[in-house]
């Protein structure tokens, strides 16, 4: 139905058998049950997941919960230690009251959006995140409503399942930049770790991450204990949750920050105060070329520049303005 249309609902990252209420030492140490899910995945996806989990299942002992795991009326037959489990990205239509699960709520019409093998087990949603999401719209998980004139297509996942396995692709706005070939041009942000949550103006999230790395900083996709700052343009639910968690400070990209940077750097990224390096000059000249500001210098202009730099003719180009003719048929004595 329309409630599963992409972009209409918030999603939750839940670990299999878990919603952690608190974290100590950077990792959650308690997990509360929230519900069951039995749809949204293909048989191949389920088979692959069960194969990964099967060595770690343990039988539930009657009358007691394993250390750190808590449930109420809805009791499982087997359990798994969270560090051996995986995160499921879940979509649902609503959060509703229920005394069958430890959090006193459960999900209405939950389905698996994707299995997040790319995330650590400790990156699952916390109880504080869950409470914020529940209060956001009185339990409704719609991010927006459909306009009366808007056409809602059937879920592409369902169509693909008939012919081929659906491929899950992370949205461009959420992907991290490829920084494998980026060289630092300064150490301005050395030892600083940043988490870029959104783009800003004409700069994409990836553009900002590349600029951070070029100036000696590091970037992560999920803030942690070592993260200096999270950067965002929009005050989204994720931004609010990160700020509320206290993991790191959140800086909103503003015109004021842009003005401060313009005082320290020219439009090509060259610092007014930090000494230039070979890499920083290469970067600045690349920006000059990209912005179409390159100027073709004549021999005379280059000679004048060298005189200014060396207070006279350059020792490296003593024949700069000379024109020589050598006739190969004449003997030169």
Image (cartoon, rainbow, N blue to C red):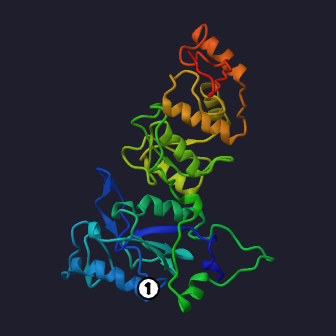
Q: Secondary structure at mark 1?
A: loop
Where is residue 75 drawn, in percent x and y?
Answer: 30, 82
Residue drawn at the location 41% of the way across and 86% of the way down: 44
The relative height of residue 319 versus residue 200 in the rendered view (above or below) is: above
- Residue 287 placement, left or right of 273: right
Residue drawn at the location 36% of the way across and 72% of the way down: 102
From the image, which quarter does the C terminus lie in? top right
Q: Which residue is nearer to you in this view: 113 or 299?
A: 299
The relative height of residue 27 versus residue 321 in the rendered view (above or below) is: below
Where is residue 40 drawn, in percent x and y?
Answer: 49, 83
Task: Name, please, the residue furthest toward the bottom.
Answer: 162
> Which quarter of the figure has residue 74?
bottom left
* Residue corresponding to mark 1: 38
Q: Which residue is nearer to you in this view: 232 or 174?
A: 174
Q: Answer yes or no: is residue 198 visible.
A: no
From the image, which quarter does the N terminus lie in? bottom right
Q: Which residue is nearer to you in this view: 332 or 295?
A: 332
Q: Which residue is nearer to you in this view: 271 or 53?
A: 271
The relative height of residue 319 versus residue 1 in the rendered view (above or below) is: above
Where is residue 278 drawn, in percent x and y?
Answer: 49, 30
Q: Answer yes or no: is residue 126 visible.
A: yes
- Residue 256 placement, left or right of 54: right
> Which quarter of the figure has residue 325?
top right
Task: Name, please, the residue furthest toward the right.
Answer: 149
Counting labels gives 1
Task: Name, please, the residue furthest toward the left.
Answer: 61
Where is residue 311 drawn, in percent x and y?
Answer: 60, 7
Label 1 neighbourhood size at 10 Å, few (<14), some (14-19), many (20+)? few
Residue drawn at the location 59% of the way across and 55% of the way down: 236
């Amino acid at each position: 139905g329309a409630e599963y249309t992409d972009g209409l609902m918030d999603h939750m990252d839940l670990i299999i058998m878990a919603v952690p209420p608190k974290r100590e030492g950077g990792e959650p140490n308690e997990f509360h049950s929230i519900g069951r899910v039995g749809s949204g995945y293909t048989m191949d996806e389920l088979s692959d997941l069960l194969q990964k989990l099967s060595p770690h299942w343990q039988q539930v002992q009657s009358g007691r919960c394993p250390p750190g795991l808590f449930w109420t009326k809805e009791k499982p037959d087997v359990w798994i230690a969270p560090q051996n489990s995986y995160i499921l990205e879940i979509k649902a239509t609503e959060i509703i009251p229920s005394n069958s699960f430890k959090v006193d709520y459960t999900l209405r019409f939950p389905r698996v959006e994707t299995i997040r093998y790319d995330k650590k087990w400790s990156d699952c949603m916390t109880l504080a995140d869950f409470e914020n999401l529940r209060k956001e719209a009185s339990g409704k998980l719609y991010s927006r409503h459909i306009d009366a004139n808007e056409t809602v297509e059937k879920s592409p996942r369902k169509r693909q399942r008939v012919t081929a396995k659906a491929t899950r692709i992370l949205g461009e706005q959420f992907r991290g930049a490829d920084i494998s070939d980026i060289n630092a041009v300064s150490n301005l942000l050395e030892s600083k770790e940043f988490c870029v949550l959104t783009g800003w103006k004409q700069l994409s999230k990836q553009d900002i991450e590349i600029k951070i790395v070029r100036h000696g900083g590091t970037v992560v996709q999920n803030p942690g204990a070592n993260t200096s700052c999270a950067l965002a343009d929009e005050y989204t639910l994720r931004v609010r949750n990160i700020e509320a968690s206290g993991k790191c400070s959140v800086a909103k990209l503003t015109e004021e920050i842009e003005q401060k940077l313009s005082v320290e750097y020219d439009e090509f990224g060259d610092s007014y105060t930090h000494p230039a390096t070979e890499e920083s000059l290469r970067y600045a000249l690349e920006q000059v070329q990209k912005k179409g500001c390159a100027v073709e210098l004549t021999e005379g202009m280059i000679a004048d520049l060298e005189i200014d730099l060396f207070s006279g003719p350059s020792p490296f180009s003593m024949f700069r303005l000379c024109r020589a003719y050598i006739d190969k048929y004449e003997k030169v004595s």
